Image: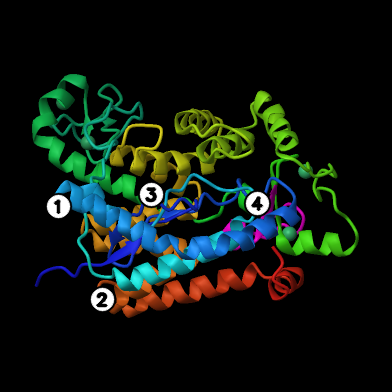
Amino acid sequence: MPPMRTEVALQVDDERPARSVAVPQGQAVVGNAGGEGGKGGRKEDGRAKALAALPRQRSLRSVSTQTSRERRKAKGGTSALGRRLGEAACPNDQKPEGSARRAEARSSVTGEAFLADHRRAWSPSTHQDSSAGIGGICKRQGDGVCANCGKQGSDTIKLKSCTACRLVKYCGVDCQRAHHKRHKKACKKRAAELKDERLYSQGHERPEGDFCPICTLPIPFPMKSHSRFNACCMKLICDGCDMAAQKRGMFDCLFCRTRYPDNDADSLTMIQTRVAKKDPAAMFFLGQKYFNGDLGLQKDMQKAAELYTEAAELGSVNALFSLGCASFFGDGVGQDEKKAVQFWTKAAMQGHVESRRNLGCIEGQNGNRERAVRHCLISAKMGHEDSLENIKQMFMDGEATKEQYVVALRGYQNTVEEMKSHDRDEAMRLGYH
Ligand SMILES: [Zn+2]
Ligand SMILES: [Zn+2]
Ligand SMILES: [Zn+2]
Ligand SMILES: [Zn+2]
């Protein structure tokens, strides 16, 4: 039976219409950079701009579709990237103001795209297993026999395990080398299994930056629709807390009490001050501003990628995610899907939900449905609706079991419930943001 083909929009965190990514089997590569990158400016402006932006956003779909169609036509076929490029824009831009409405508009756009483009080819991609292969010999002494010469381990003959797989022991480097040819296949296999164990067992908790520092609850997805980002302290404050404070007549930053900047130049100065102090969140945020050409900056994707790189080195998980997206699309860096997967893997293992889902999408594209389900299950259980949709779609296509769907659904519902609060509910009800 030929595999079912499904395509979903690449859900990314910017509002850029030009690119779109077709993804597999009910899965979309996600690009919601999450936290950092919300509103940097004044809220009033944001709302007005958001409203103004809505109709434009609505029309993006046709623009986007047109673009990818034209691209395919121009190329005389569907390239690997072309096939992947479905319905989404790239992840990196985020407008400081009004991102929420546009994000909402986006997600409805992706929803339509999902249904409309449901069946299209999966594109090939690779998944590098960098840890596979023979490793060194660990220093631990072991019992048993040398896998090469059969010598029994003892006080004098200390056997050491192959560090890559831990399956075999050797009496020395010479025996390990001699055994390599016979061992490498099993070693590689086990090393890959060990790597997978880590990949799927780590990153089930969201990173610290995903939590509102005032009420300490994790921020629902998409985060920029449920929070504001304050350039003064680089904190993401949830809409519930923000609204409650404004009701009490507090209009300064809830976290550090700084007055919000009321123009781009002041916002930029605030961010740059923190960048100079090597704050990774600020670097990531400034990277986004360069990526979009916001705050009066000249749009510069290379500069953005440089800032992301430095931020990632200093520990920004969001920057890792954005680097993955930049690599995937070739924005400011060379297009390199393997690298994108590496960045997303690193971020996902630290709890970055959209990165986790993107890994699922890539696996889906590669025809690895089981791995796709495993990834999306994790992100769905962390409260990510689109991931749940992916599982649902895969279930409907016969690629995920009913049990998997039920587990995803329950996990999702529980997590969503845990993210609720009175203030958040009220902010939602009042259309605050
Ligand atoms: Zn030996
Ligand atoms: Zn080994
Ligand atoms: Zn809060
Ligand atoms: Zn602040």
**Residue type at mark 4?**
Glu
Q: Which residue is mark 1?
A: 77
Disc 3 to disc 2: CB gap under 8 Å: no
Q: Residues within 10 Å of mark 3 (few under 14, many from 20)?
A: some
Q: CA distance from mark 1 to mark 3?
A: 35 Å
Residue 235 position within the rendered picture, expressed as x and y whole percent measured from the top left: 70, 46
Q: Nearer the viewer, residue 327 or 194?
A: 327
Q: Which residue is mark 4?
A: 97
Q: CA distance from mark 4 to mark 2?
A: 39 Å
Labels 3 and 2: the sequence-earlier one: 3
**Residue type at mark 1?**
Gly
Q: Give the number of the mark in front: 3 or 2.
A: 2
Q: Give the number of the mark in front: 1 or 3.
A: 1
Labels 3 and 4: the sequence-earlier one: 4
Q: Residue at x 48, y 65 (%)?
A: 58
Which mark is drawn over residue 199?
3
**Residue type at mark 2?**
Asp
Q: Which residue is mark 2?
A: 397
Q: CA distance from mark 2 to mark 1?
A: 27 Å
